[in-house]
Amino acid sequence: MSVWWEALTLFEKVLWAIALFFSLLFILQTVLAMIGADNDGSMGDADASVHADHGEGNSYFTIRNLVTFFTMFAWTGLACQQNGLGEMGSVAIGTVVGLLMVALMVWLMNKAATLKHSGTLETQRTVGLTGTTYLLIPAARSGMGKISVRVQGNLRDLDAMTDDPSPIATGTMVTVTSVINDRILLVSRTL
């Protein structure tokens, strides 16, 4: 091992040191992310302070991206060096590959962030929507029935009442006119 290390140029020794150090950090980040101890994508508060400075939710300047950049930079530089490319060429290609990987990670994190939603039903969003009576709705708010309505991308069966003078039979198209007590839909027959 020492013979191999001594045979390397100073440039190669620096690349190997960067590659090994940042690869270990990368593995540590990955393990922490798998067990859920990475604090939602950042290692510590350093990422949060960088975000606060720029007012952005997804920044290029995070600890995770720094580790990714240097890991890819060093391994790409070593590969280029081993294939006979000079030091400047290895640094240039390593820099480009590192930056491309960081850009890819930021793009993926932005796409993943769009998938997040609480899933909590906001009943006010049902006003104006049409649905179908699932269980008979008694007339003039004398009892409760259910309707099936597509809201927030999901088909939901929700409690409903009506002010109509006659009951609304199962399978009838209805329109949500308002919400009572933030949970019961007030509906009427769809004309």
Image: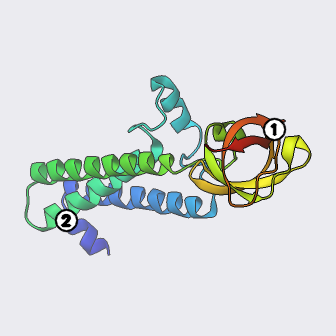
Q: Nearer the viewer, residue 159 or 22?
A: 159
Kind of residue indicated by mark 1: Asp
On residue 163, which mark appears?
A: 1
> How are the residues colored?
rainbow
Q: Does dot 2 land on a helix, a strand or a loop?
A: helix
- The residue singled out by tag 2 in the image is 79
> Is there any visible trace of residue 85 in the rendered image?
yes
Instruction: Describe residue 103's horizontal placement relative to residue 163 as left or right.
Output: left
- Where 184 falls versus 89 (above or below)? above
Residue 71 point in image, percent of width and height: 34, 56
Q: Measuring from the top left, give residue 9's x and y in whole percent.
A: 18, 59
Amino acid type of the residue that numbered disc 2 sits on in the rendered structure: Ala
Is residue 12 in sight in this rendering? no
Assign a secondary structure to mark 1: loop
Residue 152: x %, y % from top left: 59, 47
Quarter where residue 66 is shown: top left
Foreground of the two, 166 or 27: 166
- Which comes sooner in the sequence, label 2 or label 1? 2
Tell me if residue 21 comes above or below residue 174 in the rendering: below
